[in-house]
Image (cartoon, coloured by chain):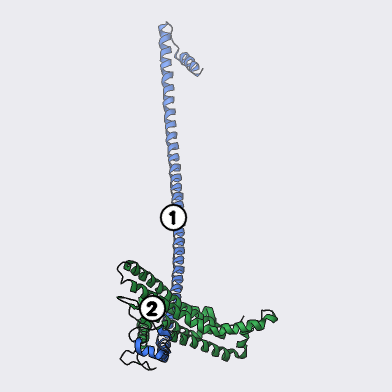
Chain colours: A blue, B green
Amino acid sequence: MATEAHGGAAAEHAVGMPQLDVTTWPNQIFWLLVTLVVIYLVLTRIALPRIGAVLSERRGTITNDLTAAEELKQKAVEAERAYNDALARARADAAKIVAEARAEIQKDLAAATAQADVEISAKAAQSEARIGEIRAGAVAAVTEVALDTAHELVAALGGTADAQAVSAAVSARLKG
Amino acid sequence: MAEGGFAIHPMDQFVVKPLFGGEHVEWYTITNVTLWLGIAVLAIIALMVIGTRGRAVIPSRSQSIAELLYGFIHNMVEEVTGHEGVKYFPYVMTLFMFVLVANLLGLIPMSFTTTSHVAVTVTLALLVFFGVTLLGLVKKGPAFLAMFWVSSAPLALRPVLAIIEVISYFVRPVSHSIRLAGNLMAGHAVIKVFAGFASMAVISPVAIGAVSAIYALELLVAVVQAYVFTILTCVYLKDAVGDAHH
């Protein structure tokens, strides 16, 4: 019956389910097996080894790249540490130089101050001496003026001045 | 089925016919089945061989797809069957690629869906069934039969469970094959029915919308059924090569 249905109507329209027409089964099964064998050979001979190789190669590449990246990162960390070290050293050097410069300046300043002090005290001594002279001069002048004045006073009052007695009296008076 | 100008022949798309004339389909006749099986082979070669010819570390688009499929099935085999099962990966991959590509090719309008035929899916399921059974018997010997003897159940229940287990074991190829063929056949027949309705002006917008929607669904079904077929194959394979613990 199936054969009849197939021979008659199948070419035009399906009668019932074509899937159940067992006359076509050997054909389908035969060609399916051929297909499967071809696919299997293509996959196992060419495709799967190739893809497997590519995948493992990629895994290797990625692993290598990660390792390289890790190394580079390590290097970067080292470089940063070296930079920081250099910076710290530079800072310490700078501080030392500043301290030295400051000490130098301090020393110069102290020397200059000392010299200035010496000069000032020399000048002060000179001035002192000069003031002493002036004062002495002034005292002499005052004595002379007092002596003269005393002489004149005595003369004006009508006495005769004993020069010796007047000068003794004036100097006694000046001391007092 | 012909009703005047309004004719729907949802099953016509499944008819096996010789390509180069002749009435009878002998086992060697080149038919539309042969054609679409051949196209499936060419599609697989295009994707898996030509698509990967660059062998690039940074893959091209087609190479990415091939690698994705490879990784997907490889992981599935490894996860489901364990480390022992990985050496059967090429067989599983062959089945998966064939079912996936045949399902997807079937969605091209006017094409022939080889995997909607029970003859094809039964052959695939029986290959898996016999392959797994023989492999199990060869690798484990009589211990393979211990999987029917549920040692965790009470002793009195074990013979009953053994019968159920044996039946379920032999039903496997049936469900394995009918699931695939049935899903595809039903979906494609429904598309054809709605496409037939599209010839009626009144409901044609609805029908075309439905065809589009079902087409999208069928795209999902095509991929999911290929996945289901493959993962069931892996589950069966696990009985033969994995550590039996049930």
Q: Residue at x 36, y 80 (%)?
A: B105
- Counting from the top left corner in percent of width and height, residue B235 is at 53, 80
Indicate whether B126 appears above or below B206. below
For the question of whether residue A61 can be seen, the reply is no
How many discs appear? 2
Chain at tag 2: B
Residue B154 vs A126, above or below: the answer is below
Image position, residue A88 (x, y; %):
46, 58
Q: What kind of residue is marked 1?
A: Ala
Residue A70 locus on image (x, y percent): 46, 70
> In the image shown, does A160 or B191 lie closer to the viewer?
B191
Determine whether, in the image, residue B134 is placed left or right of residue A162.
right
Outermost residue toward the front? B4
Task: Identify the mark at residue A94; answer none if there is no mark.
Answer: 1
- Return the residue nearer the eye: B28 or A71: B28
Residue B213 screen position, x and y as percent: 38, 69
Asked if the residue at tag 1 contacts the one at tag 2, i.e. Cβ–Cβ closer than 8 Å, the answer is: no
Real-space CA distance between mark 2 and mark 1, rounded to the nearest whole angstrom: 77 Å
Q: Quadrant of residue B4?
A: bottom left
Q: Nearer the viewer, residue A98 or A49?
A: A49
Q: Residue furthest top?
A: A158
Give the residue type at disc 2.
Leu
- Residue depicted at x 46% and y 66%: A78
Confirm whether circles 2 and 1 share one chain. no
Residue name at image x 43 percent, y 37 percent: A120
Q: Which mark is residue B104?
A: 2
The quarter of the rendered structure image containing the C terminus of chain B is bottom right
Which numbered mark, 2 or 1, is in the foreground of this view? 2
Q: Callout 1: few (<14), some (14-19), or many (20+) C-alpha neighbours within 10 Å?
A: few
**Residue drawn at the location 58% of the way across and 90% of the way down:** B137
| Of A27 and B67, the residue lying toward us | A27
| Chain identifier of the residue bearing label 1 in the image | A
